[in-house]
Amino acid sequence: MDARAPLGLRERGKLEKRQRIREAARAVFREKGFERATTREIAERAGVANATLFAYARDKRDLMMLVVNDDLDAITDAALTPFTGDRPLLDQLIEVFRPRYEYWAADPDFSRHAVQQTFASLTEGESAGPETVRFHARRPKIVAQLTDLVREKQRLGRVGRNVDAESVGWLFMAIYQAEQRQWLIAEKPDVAAGLERLRALFRIVIRGIDAARGEA
C-alpha cells in the first residue's frame, strides 16, 4: 500500500477547502466591499468554521490578499521569462505590465478594494498575515526582472553603463504603482488609455537613461 496516499488525500482536501474560502471571500468582497464584509459571512458561505478560515488567512485583509495572490502569481510567472531580441525597451516594459492592467480592469470595484488594502497593509510590518507577506514578496521579483531588462539594454549599448540598473527597475515599478491607483479611480478603467499614460511616463525615464550613454 502506498503510504503517501492518505497524505495526498489530506492535501487535496486542504486545497479544495482553500479554493472554497477564496471563492467565498471574492464573492462577499464583491457584493459588500471590504469594510462591510465579515469573516463570519465568508466562513459561512465557504462552508467552514471560523477557526478553519483563520488557518488559511490571519484576518480579513489577509483574506483579500488570498483572493488576488493566485491570480497575480500566475501573471507574474508568465512575465518572468527572459526577453529575447533587441526590441525597444519601452515595448518590453509595456509587455510586463499589460496583464496587470487587464486583470485589474476585469473587475474594477473589487480591484479598488484590493489595491487599497495592499497599501494599507504596508503598516503591518512583521505582524502581517502569510498571504499579505506573500503579496509583498512579489514586488522584488518584478523589480528583479525589470533590472535584468535594463542590464540587457546596457550590454547592448542602448542604456548608459553608469546608470544603476536596479534603481531604474525600482523607478519603473514605482511609476506603475502610482499610475495604477490613479487609473483605477475611473468608473470604467480603460486598459488602452492606462497603458498609453504609463508608456508616456516610462518614455521620460528612458530618455533620461538613454542620454546617460553619452556620460558613460
Image (spheres, grey):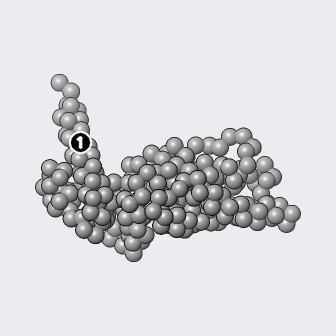
Identity of the residue drawn at 40% across and 68% down: 116
The mark tally for this picture is 1
Percent of width and height locating residue 205: 71, 64
Q: Quadrant of residue 68?
A: bottom left
Identity of the residue drawn at 52% across and 64% down: 183
- Closest to the observer, 34 or 43: 34
Q: Is residue 20 left or right of residue 190?
A: left
Mark 1 falls on what kind of element? helix
Q: Is residue 72 above or below residue 183?
A: above
Q: Farthest front residue?
A: 187
Let me know if residue 63 appears in the view: no
Q: Farthest right residue?
A: 214
Quarter of the picture holding the C terminus: bottom right
Percent of width and height locating residue 155: 76, 50
Assess disc 1: are there few (<14), some (14-19) or many (≥20) residues with their C-alpha within 10 Å of its C-alpha: few
Percent of width and height locating residue 17: 21, 46
Residue type at numbered disc 1 = Glu
Q: Is residue 160 left or right of residue 39?
A: right
Let me know if residue 191 appears in the view: yes
Quarter of the picture holding the N terminus: top left
Q: Farthest left residue?
A: 49
Q: Farthest bottom residue?
A: 123
Percent of width and height locating residue 191: 54, 53
- Closest to the observer, 205 or 29: 29
Q: Quadrant of residue 194?
A: bottom right
Identity of the residue drawn at 62% across and 60% down: 198
Identity of the residue drawn at 64% across and 53% down: 93
Q: Is residue 13 above or below residue 46?
A: above
Q: Quadrant of residue 199?
A: bottom right
Q: Which residue is mark 1?
A: 16
